[in-house]
Image (cartoon, grey):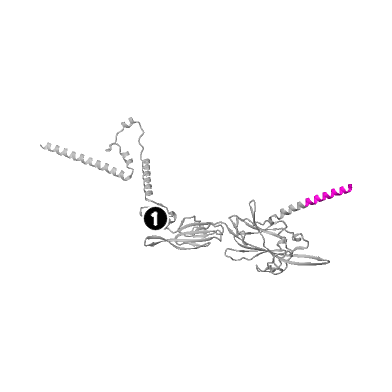
Amino acid sequence: MNITKKFSRIAAALTAAVMALAMSAVAVNAQEISPAQNESASESSGNLQRFYFDKNLVNAGLDTGFSEKNDIDKDDPHFGWELGKFNLTGHTRVTEENTDNPVFLKNVGDTLTLWFKLDQDIDRLDGVDGLTISEDANGYDQYFGIKETNFKKGALIIRHSDYRNKDQEPVIYTDYLNSKAKKGSNTKVEIFEEGDYEVALDYEVERKTNFLFITNAEYFNYRVFFKFSVRNGNCMVYPFDASTKEELPNNAITPNGFYLDLAKSRYLDIDIKREVLLNGEDGLTEDVRFNTVAKDGDKYLSEGIYTISVRNKYTGQETQKKIYVGNDNLLKAYMTTGLSIKEIQDKVAKGAQINDDGTIVTVSETALASKENSQNNITELSKALPKASTEPASDINKKETPSDPFGGNLFYLLIACGSIPMIIAVITMIVVFKGGKNKKEKASAGVKAARNSKKKKN
């Protein structure tokens, strides 16, 4: 009886220990594979956002250049498990998540990186003995045009197409699963810039079965394939002066012309319109000379007002800039003020002036400026003339009072006049007054002399 109890206790303890180990293993496995099992396309973790490429595995046949796309059914050795998952990080936003070609938007400073997370032991796939990644000594890829070569244990192939839709030579990483990745690790694959990308992972699986003393080996080819695009998320175009090479802001004026720089944002829609002035029946009128598409590096040297319209079709944002090329003040004002040509001409007819920067100064503003200049002249003149004496009144009375026909108020009269012409007029009046006085005195003296001479003769 005691032996039975002891045995029961030992069995219960062993059972509890086994259950605890099993629960611990489930928890560890959940931590390892939960990112790969996430069915949503993207996942955020703090500042890191991952996008997982899913449902892209096919049975590619055997030695067909990985060209077949066969479903993986229950009799397939790859049924019910995945080798791993590709994921992408570093993007700001992803659009069209439900299509076969997601578009990732990046801003300045963003670095997009493609990763592969291996979820299997390549020497014991799905935990099955005899199911391994095999060396594919005669592998080739029909889609990418890669000739027969030794793919070894998995070949990763990446091809980039630029904004001209020109395919570059595919980059091949042979023996990728054996030398690049370990189970449970997220392995960095590549850093991507703007363009379209195609990615394939070609690998061969070997399944060995034993019957008595005979070992049978079967081989299967599998392929993971997906596409995606990378675009800049901005909506900017940068015009530069054709001569000075300096960047021109919106509403800039340059006599030299300009050229466009897209800052490597090759997928923006850019339209440009040029307007000039023409002589018509009603005088000068604005006329559109062309309205067309533009591209990076285009140069514009002819006179006119250029309106540059930029649109990012992936974000829906639009930007517009205006640049004037030339020296016509009327066109400068047309661009700067936003007024029509007729409105500007009406203001000029009423005496308004156009500055070199395109701003308009009206008649009232000109009169105000003239008044301010006159007041400034008076102030400067008062500073230049001697100040009134601050001596005591008794001392001032003792001094000789200068001969002044205006009663000693000439100084104040000059200040009140406030202009040089008035000063000249006053001085002329003084000279005339003194000259007249001298002539009168001389005439009086002549009369007296004549009278005295007559008296002497008598």
Give 57 or 64, whichever is nearer the viewer. Answer: 57
Res. 440 visible in picture:
yes
Relative vertical location of residue 445 with respect to residue 310 in this rendering, above or below: above
Residue closest to the far top: 394
Residue 3 included in the magenta stretch of the image: yes
Relative vertical location of residue 435 with respect to residue 259 in this rendering, above or below: above
Image mark count: 1
Where is residue 414 shown, x and y percent of the image?
32, 41
Query: Where is mark 1, residue-wise?
Result: 343
Res. 173 visible in picture:
no
Residue 422 included in the magenta stretch of the image: no
In-image side of 269 versus 375 (left or right) = right
Please tell me in which quadrant of the rendered image residue 392 appears. top left
Disc 1 element: helix
In-image side of 90 versus 455 (left or right) = right
Where is residue 69 shown, x and y percent of the image?
68, 67
Give 92 or 331, whichever is nearer the viewer. Answer: 92
Residue closest to the far left: 458
Secondary structure mostly taken by the magenta-highlighted segment of the chain: helix
Mark 1 residue crowding within 10 angstroms, few (<14) / some (14–19) / many (20+) = few
Give 242 or 355, whichever is nearer the viewer. Answer: 355
Q: Which residues are magenta?
A: 1-21
In-image side of 268 versus 50 (left or right) = left
Q: Amino acid at mark 1?
A: Glu
Please tell me in which quadrant of the rendered image residue 419 appears. top left
Residue closest to the far front: 1
Where is residue 435 shown, x and y percent of the image?
24, 42
On the rendered image, what quadrant is the C terminus found in? Answer: top left
Please tell me in which quadrant of the rendered image residue 348 appears. bottom left
Where is residue 433 shown, x and y percent of the image?
25, 41
